[in-house]
Image: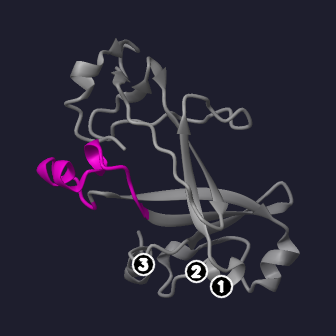
Amino acid sequence: MYSQAFLDALNTGEVLIRKTWMRKGKVSVQFMQQIEGPSSGGSNKFVAMNNGIENGGRQRVTTIMSVLPNVIASWGLNPEKDYFSENKAVFASTIYGDCDIEVTENTTPNPYMADHQPKINPVTGDILAFDGQPIYRHTQLVEEANNQFIKHNGVIDAETGELIEAESAADSPAIG
């Protein structure tokens, strides 16, 4: 459960440290930022409102980086902590200066992530597709984001694996 302090900090649009955990001798740090999404589908605030989707026009994105334990200690952070439940948010800018989470969408899964899941419609569970291929979201921490979103032109039925043509996909309320 997110603390009110964390939610309030997310609403600033700044990058926050969400969570840290040990993995293979390093500390995995998950960052989170609330960004403006593309103006189509579920990211369009008017379409979102019409379909009961909260925070229409905005998306919460995350990225993960590995950090040496001694560096985490020098930052005054715990290597195993859920910062999203704290009464005080940790802003990434206090460590890195100005930073953003950059989103790049394409039809190529991350080759280093065996379980990289494609984008889905959270209402139906269907996979969002572009030219018949699943859309994958890639994120990274950068100084200034140049987000690259793909507008889906079809969906892949989650149950049958069949491609549903663009005319049907256009009615899908939650995209972006």
Numbered disc 1: secondary structure: helix
Task: List x then y, in percent, for residue 103.
Answer: 54, 51
Residue annotated with mark 1: 94
Q: Is residue 6 above or below residue 27?
A: below
Q: What is the C-alpha distance between the residues marked 3 and 1?
A: 14 Å
Quadrant in which the C terminus appears: top left
Chain part drawn in magenta = 35-55
Say which amino acid is labelled 3: Thr
Q: Label 2's element?
A: loop
Circle nearer the N terminus (3, 1): 3
Of residues 14 and 125, the one nearer the viewer is 14
Decide which of tag 3 and tag 2 comes sooner along the chain. Answer: 3
- The quarter of the displayed image where residue 95 is located: bottom right
User: Is 66 positioned to the left or the right of 104 in the image?
Assistant: right
Q: On the image, numbered disc 3 is attached to which residue?
A: 12
Q: CA distance from mark 2 to mark 1?
A: 6 Å
Find the distance from the CA under tag 3 to the CA under tag 2.
10 Å
Which quarter of the figure has residue 2? bottom left
Name the residue beneath numbered marker 2.
91
- For label 3, the crowd category at 10 Å Cα-Cα, with few meaning under 14, some 14 to 19 and many 20 or more, is few
Residue shown at 47% from the left, 87% from the top: 87
Q: Is residue 143 magenta?
A: no
Quadrant holding the N terminus: bottom left
What amino acid type is highlighted by mark number 2?
A: Phe
Vertical arrangement, residue 134 with respect to residue 164, above or below = below
Q: Where is residue 9 drawn, in percent x and y?
A: 44, 80
Q: Are marks 2 and 1 in contact (CB under 8 Å)?
A: yes
Q: Is residue 17 left or right of residue 113?
A: left
Circle 2 residues within 10 Å: few <14, some 14–19, many ≥20: many
Spot occupied by residue 162 in the image (x, y as percentages of width and height): 37, 12
Q: Is residue 134 left or right of residue 4?
A: right
For residue 39: magenta? yes
